[in-house]
Image (spheres, coloured by chain):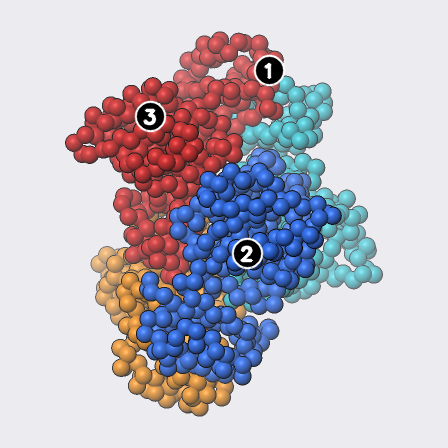
Chain colours: A blue, B cyan, C orange, D red
Amino acid sequence: MENTTACLLISCPDKQGLVAKIANFIYSNGGNIIHADQHTDFASGLFLTRIEWQLDGFNLPRDLIAPAFNSIAQPIDAKWELHFSDSIPRIAIWVSKQEHCLLDLLWRHSAKEFLAEIPLIISNHPTLKEIAEQFNIDFHHIPITKETKIEQEKKQLEILAKYKIDLIVLAKYMQILSSDFVAQFPQIINIHHSFLPAFVGANPYQKAYERGVKIIGATSHYVTADLDAGPIIEQDVVRISHRDTVKDLIRKGKDLERIVLARAVRLHLKNRVLVNSNRTVVFE
Amino acid sequence: MENTTACLLISCPDKQGLVAKIANFIYSNGGNIIHADQHTDFASGLFLTRIEWQLDGFNLPRDLIAPAFNSIAQPIDAKWELHFSDSIPRIAIWVSKQEHCLLDLLWRHSAKEFLAEIPLIISNHPTLKEIAEQFNIDFHHIPITKETKIEQEKKQLEILAKYKIDLIVLAKYMQILSSDFVAQFPQIINIHHSFLPAFVGANPYQKAYERGVKIIGATSHYVTADLDAGPIIEQDVVRISHRDTVKDLIRKGKDLERIVLARAVRLHLKNRVLVNSNRTVVFE
Amino acid sequence: MENTTACLLISCPDKQGLVAKIANFIYSNGGNIIHADQHTDFASGLFLTRIEWQLDGFNLPRDLIAPAFNSIAQPIDAKWELHFSDSIPRIAIWVSKQEHCLLDLLWRHSAKEFLAEIPLIISNHPTLKEIAEQFNIDFHHIPITKETKIEQEKKQLEILAKYKIDLIVLAKYMQILSSDFVAQFPQIINIHHSFLPAFVGANPYQKAYERGVKIIGATSHYVTADLDAGPIIEQDVVRISHRDTVKDLIRKGKDLERIVLARAVRLHLKNRVLVNSNRTVVFE
Amino acid sequence: MENTTACLLISCPDKQGLVAKIANFIYSNGGNIIHADQHTDFASGLFLTRIEWQLDGFNLPRDLIAPAFNSIAQPIDAKWELHFSDSIPRIAIWVSKQEHCLLDLLWRHSAKEFLAEIPLIISNHPTLKEIAEQFNIDFHHIPITKETKIEQEKKQLEILAKYKIDLIVLAKYMQILSSDFVAQFPQIINIHHSFLPAFVGANPYQKAYERGVKIIGATSHYVTADLDAGPIIEQDVVRISHRDTVKDLIRKGKDLERIVLARAVRLHLKNRVLVNSNRTVVFE
């Protein structure tokens, strides 16, 4: 169970024999499947699956698995990803001034909840530099103005490349990324301080207060060019009452944001999330 | 505890001595306060309170309580309501074709969860007539078209008056009431099949499915002229996943709608809800 | 999607190639798998799976599927069940005096939430006879005393056989079944008015009140000889406060019981529950 | 609203005129009540209230409030506490080897969620010394064996006295306090890694796993001589499934423990918890 595993995330048009085809590929090469989960989206006619097997005893050398699977994937028109449990993804956490999500991610990282490296923090403010130092993580302060945004994004992409970053986690980064940036670096998880699609945009807690809602939420999603509208990975809510001031909503919201973002990052790192057009399939 | 009680719901500009003033009014007349709850809304400078006391041993006869309290209420600019626990409100349930909320309310009524009478069901369809008969409740079928709406609303108001209705519960009544109607009969509770303010309007489950949300909700609110925007009384949510089809969302949503509407009706009937501009204070 | 499907629930010692073996059995006979879910319980070394495929186009006639699969199941030491989506299970609901769970099940049945027939209600009290009549269901009043229990259980088993019952749902049946009875009719779902394993036994709401808990729950489980200790299918909770009396806990508990029992029955009927020693795997 | 306030927590046998009596005491001395909450426990015949007022403009000097109120409290047989919002309680956090609750409390403290000072950490292990240093808090390592317990508790009491500690928070302190200790220092909040009263004692997550429950919880309570049976302040739960290993339960449990303990500490510090025999009244 603690052995190295390989994991395939596959989506393709549904047709007969897909499960057998994929399972046979693994079995005929001596692999032991430890998790297999499948979903057929009848609305879109898509078959989506996540399959994980032990590499111990698998006959194909690692570098031949992808090419070998490709010959199965092409005839069935599959989009797919292959991950190995011992290739550790590298995360850059992006922040502004608020620390709660950053700290929470860093604690979980040191508590070994995330199988990942976090070599880089980027911020448009210098505020959280000290936390970065305390956790021995490089901190890059890259201020953004309307005028400098495009130029600074170029710089950000260079730094991401230099640090070989696989995933950006926006942990209360209060800037909007350009669609160019998102096109060039599409692996980005955001935490939205609201129960999407309600209260999109700024000051959601103030708006929730004014509307007198009895429950507030938070949403973690992949970032797409369309702001706040990317595929949702995880959401959660907390009950509030008339006794809660806007300040209380912010405090309760912080707890939600920490937990919802951490769950989303963990699900992503465990390769449990498959994007299906603008929705996600989460194989929990 | 099972004795008859009186209950005052009061809101007024906050100032010193309000609690003492109101408590003294009751105490000096020999009343025993069994519940007192207060909220100061610092944002709007309002003091809101709910106070309930036993009539047993109270020196003022019932019909003199209101005039007596008025002399306290006027100088402090208070809006207030007085309720007696043995004056049973009369409810009209309005439905269209769906039965789940209606049935749920009727069961709870027969299980004595609501201290109310339900003499009247109004519907724009004949579909649920049989249920009305089964529970021995008068059923009025009042079809609505764009052309007949104003005329039919007049008829509805006459029926409400004839049955001496105190409260309308819209239990999946799929018609919009005119602002005129709402102005003339303002005591209306609605169940909205969505977690407001998300997915306002038609087909919220389809929209929730398409947006790929992980949690759906339902909202019960007072009806105002501004559709779906009245003060929220109660909300609740349920978790969903990619495995849930729109049909599953509808099924899960029904359970939510039943429970959220029932809680809101109960809170209203127990005089626990105070409207504060477009928000509610719920003294649970 | 609405075509007739077959469904296999399988558990066996884990080993290599199980997924491929089972998928091949279906594929080589022309079946189209629409759901496949698998779980490996590493603690017990068990492989558990649920696999559902369309019968349309499947080459094996129905009555040959079981014998054919048996030749695969035997070498891998599998325990398994085969279900067809068009063979409608027959349910007997057992009650005592409380109606809320019974009514809820019957309403869901008429709303087509359950694919099942409910031809029989058994009760140790005559209280709910009228409801049975209203829904056109046979009602058998079988009173139980300590002295008559064994004899009456014999009678109950005869009635179950006569009605060809597949599943008993104890919907607040306040009698304990003998282990003999359970051995002879093992398909029984119960609702326990508590968050097991807390407050096992009588008066859980009184006990919860006295202990001052902030949350109460309900549990639906399969019945085994060991009272209240059978495999748990579903649980849920609701928040309470010091303002809730024992009566309020009972009222809130009823809502929980209705929903938790309905969910458990639905999961069972959809063949989504696999018992793994004293635990369940629920393939949602 | 940000002015200094005084707060009375009162419990006494219920009788007529209590609200008026207490409100008059404050009003007649020029106090402005900003929160008043009351609960009558009809089962035990107790009246419990929390009342908070602004000291600005109050005619009584601080040191005379208690003696003045005493003359009201005595005739009504009241137990009561008086708190001032600007007298900051001093907390000692006790830990063993696990850091998650400690870190969470310290972060919330630096985020100003708690109005308190935390000058002291006591542990029976040296493991978390570094965290104490990082946050500039004195750390006392006081190892405990069966033989040294009584002696070490004496030492602990001395340290508590020296640091003028008002409240002990057991943040995963894995030792049982003697009833002598609890008698001498009764202000102790504990986090129990379970949904009490289920799975009392050691290894609750292992037990929850074995029992196959679908929901796990955590409980924060005041410590009494009777282990794990003190008045519950706050509880919460999280849903689990058959896919969760014991390790997953522990991870999910940690999140619960952090949040439930933090909520309980916050409620206590805001003087919102009144103990009523072995239950709490939480004026939220």
Q: Chain of mark 1?
A: D
Position above or below: A244 against D237: above
In the image, residue D184 above or below residue A78: above
For label 3, the residue is: D186
Closer to viewer: mark 3 or mark 2: 2
At label 3, counting other C-alpha atoms closer than 10 Å, the crowd grade (few under 14, some 14-19, many 20 or more) is some
Q: CA distance from mark 3 to mark 2?
A: 57 Å
Task: Give the chain letter at badge 2.
Answer: A
Q: Is residue A70 visible?
A: yes
Element under disc 3: loop
Q: Label 1, secondary structure: give it.
A: loop
Q: Please, is residue C213 above or below residue B175 in the view?
A: above
Task: Give residue D56's mark.
Answer: 1
Residue at screen point 42% across, 88% down: C28
Which is nearer the eye, B49 or B81? B49
Residue D226 visible in the displayed image: no
Residue B171 found in image quarter: bottom right
Q: Quadrant of the C terminus of chain B?
A: top right
Label 2 sits on residue: A162
Question: Where in the figure is residue C20, as x and y percent of width and height?
Answer: 38, 80
Q: Amino acid at mark 3?
A: Pro
Amino acid type, residue under disc 1 in the picture: Asp
User: Taking B56 as reference, is C50 left or right?
Assistant: left
For image coordinates 54% across by 32% down, the residue present is B4
Task: Judge from the rendering whether residue D196 lies leftward or rightward of residue D54; answer left or right.
Answer: left
Q: Amino acid at mark 2?
A: Lys
Q: CA distance from mark 2 to mark 1?
A: 60 Å
Report the mark closest to the observer, 2 or 1: 2
Nearest the eye: A115 or B240 = A115
Marks 1/3: CA–CA distance: 32 Å
